[in-house]
């Protein structure tokens, strides 16, 4: 026989030990990065472990990442791995449809990410940020993550769903959002339809969301009004067969964007600030750039925001050291081969931005905070593709990265110009109990408003 059969190929090394059936579930829950890093250091680019009856294979490093991100959907399926989001996004939306249909649906969002829209969002983001920080008064202490979560909900409501929705944003929306989020946990990953109170609340909230958004659509259609927001792009969109999106479809896609983009942006904004305040030697460079680009001006153009490359490097370094999504998962539908190893269908494949971003082969002194590693001269993330993967890669790469970076830039531009800030705690550690990994709360910062805009 000349061709090798599956049985002749190596299977990835298996992490020994773990609990019966649960495997490493508890350790993964407690501190996933310690566990995954330990496996990577022991076995290298690929190893497997047991998790609640499933075999999970972690791939690490630029080449292994590339194999993961470029695998076709019928081999490594994102849809099958993210089924727990279906009750939130809705029937026939995103992970409840074929990969082709899902990419058609995500394509409807692209007009909302065009230059002129991004310009409009820059204005909305700045207005929201200034109004929000106005409520802080002269001095005090705030939980930075809680604040970033509130502000990014305001920004997302304005940019995604539009001014009508933002103007009438109620505590009901916060409650519904909270109920939807209550449906995301480890149990939902395995059994999203169990008759639990939290899943019932999730489903009721989903129905109510459509009821809140439908009248806005109806009203815009009746009055012929157009908004500069994602909702408008979805209202205008047509499937290939010419049909328009239903109100349920539109709501589902808006929820997809909200869930993909809001917590993640809040967390990235919080880590950007915490890391900067932990390394204040980088602040003068950022303030000098503010002065050079904006001077005392209070309006931030898109062009100006793009010129904030020093600030951008500190956001990128936060993305590297504290990626909001620490594990990306696919269900293995067909046997998958990597570097001579055969990974069997039925299990899960995973890459971890948090582990990859600390590989010494990719990043110089990877545990050190060093935003200058991203200067054009050093460009450590450009040495090989799939090195910095905080926004994923390949066919399912994030579509909202530019939006997220712009938002974090606006928030920190406003904050740093208006306040003197300092940290309250000695340490700010990641909280692994949530799907999007932010700083453990309370994560307080102290602020004092400065008399004149600080530039
Ligand atoms: C700091 C903020 C953000 C982070 C860290 C982030 C990260 C990611 C990552 C890692 C993926 C790939 C997931 C995978 O491969 O399994 C992804 C996909 C996605 N992101 Fe983001 N994201 C952010 C903000 C946003 C925003 C603001 C939006 C929308 C406005 C957005 C929309 C999406 C969508 C729709 C996908 C799915 C793409 C696909 O499957 O084809 N994200 N994001």
Image (cartoon, helix red, strand yellow):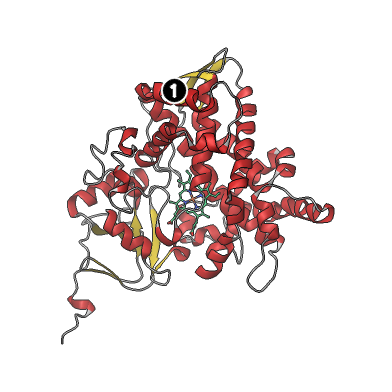
Residue 194 visible in this rendered orientation of the protein? no
Residue positioned 58% across, 50% down in the render: 113
Image quadrant where residue 76 sits:
bottom left
Q: What residue is rendered at 84% in x and 55% in y?
A: 222
- Residue at 55% x, 36% y: name it: 149
Between residues 81 and 293, which one lies in front from this camera angle? 293
Q: Which residue is mark 1?
A: 288
Q: Tell me, yes or no, if residue 368 can be seen here.
A: yes
Label 1, secondary structure: give it: helix
Front residue of this view, candidates 396 and 425: 396
Q: Is residue 257 above or below residue 193?
A: above
Coordinates of residue 322 in the picture (x, y in percent): 38, 39
Q: Look at the image and tell me in which quarter the N terminus lies.
A: bottom left
Residue at 31% across, 32% down? 369
Q: Is residue 29 left or right of residue 201?
A: left
Name the spot of residue 75 as percent of width and height, x first: 38, 71
Answer with left or right where residue 63 lies relative to residue 234.
left
- Rendering coords of residue 195 (x, y %): 57, 59
- Asked whether 449 or 75 is in front, the reply is 449
């Amino acid at each position: 026989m000349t061709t090798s059969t599956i049985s002749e190929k190596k299977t990835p090394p298996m992490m020994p030990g773990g609990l019966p059936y649960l495997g490493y579930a508890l350790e993964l829950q407690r501190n996933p990065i310690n566990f995954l890093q330990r496996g990577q250091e022991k076995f290298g680019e690929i190893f497997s472990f047991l998790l609640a009856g499933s075999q999970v294979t972690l791939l690490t490093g630029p080449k292994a990442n590339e194999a993961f991100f470029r695998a076709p959907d019928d081999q490594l399926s994102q849809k099958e791995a993210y089924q727990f989001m279906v009750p939130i996004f809705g029937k026939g939306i995103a992970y409840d449809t074929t990969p082709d249909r899902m990419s058609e649906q995500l394509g409807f969002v692209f007009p909302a990410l065009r230059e002129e829209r991004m310009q409009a969002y820059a204005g909305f983001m700045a207005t929201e940020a200034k109004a929000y920080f106005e409520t802080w008064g002269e001095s005090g202490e705030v939980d930075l993550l809680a604040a970033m979560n509130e502000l990014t909900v305001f920004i997302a409501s304005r940019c995604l769903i539009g001014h009508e929705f933002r103007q009438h944003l109620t505590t009901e929306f916060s409650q519904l959002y909270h109920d939807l989020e209550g449906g995301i946990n480890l149990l939902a990953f395995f059994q999203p339809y169990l008759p639990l109170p939290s899943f019932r609340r999730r489903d009721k909230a989903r129905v109510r969301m459509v009821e809140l958004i439908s009248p806005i659509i109806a009203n815009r259609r009746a009055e012929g009004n157009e908004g500069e927001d994602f909702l408008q792009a979805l209202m205008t969109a047509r499937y290939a067969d010419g049909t328009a999106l239903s109100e349920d479809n539109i709501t589902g896609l808006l929820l997809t964007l909200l869930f993909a983009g809001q917590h993640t942006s809040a967390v990235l904004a919080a880590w950007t600030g915490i890391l900067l305040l932990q390394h204040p030697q980088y602040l003068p460079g950022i303030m000098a750039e503010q002065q050079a680009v904006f001077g005392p001006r209070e309006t931030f153009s898109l062009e100006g925001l793009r010129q904030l490359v020093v600030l951008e490097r500190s956001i990128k370094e936060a993305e590297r050291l504290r990626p909001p999504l620490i594990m990306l998962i696919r269900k293995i539908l067909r046997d998958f081969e990597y570097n001579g190893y055969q990974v069997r269908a039925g299990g899960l494949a995973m890459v971890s931005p948090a582990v990859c971003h600390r590989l010494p082969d990719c990043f110089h002194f990877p545990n050190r905070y060093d935003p200058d590693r991203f200067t054009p001269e050093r460009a450590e993330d450009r040495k090989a593709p799939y090195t910095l993967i905080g926004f994923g890669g390949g066919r399912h790469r994030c579509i909202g990265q530019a939006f997220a970076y712009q938002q974090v830039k606006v928030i920190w531009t406003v904050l740093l110009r208006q306040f003197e800030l300092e940290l309250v705690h000695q340490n700010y550690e990641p909280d692994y109990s949530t799907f999007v990994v932010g700083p453990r709360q309370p994560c307080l910062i102290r602020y004092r408003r400065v008399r004149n805009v600080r530039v």
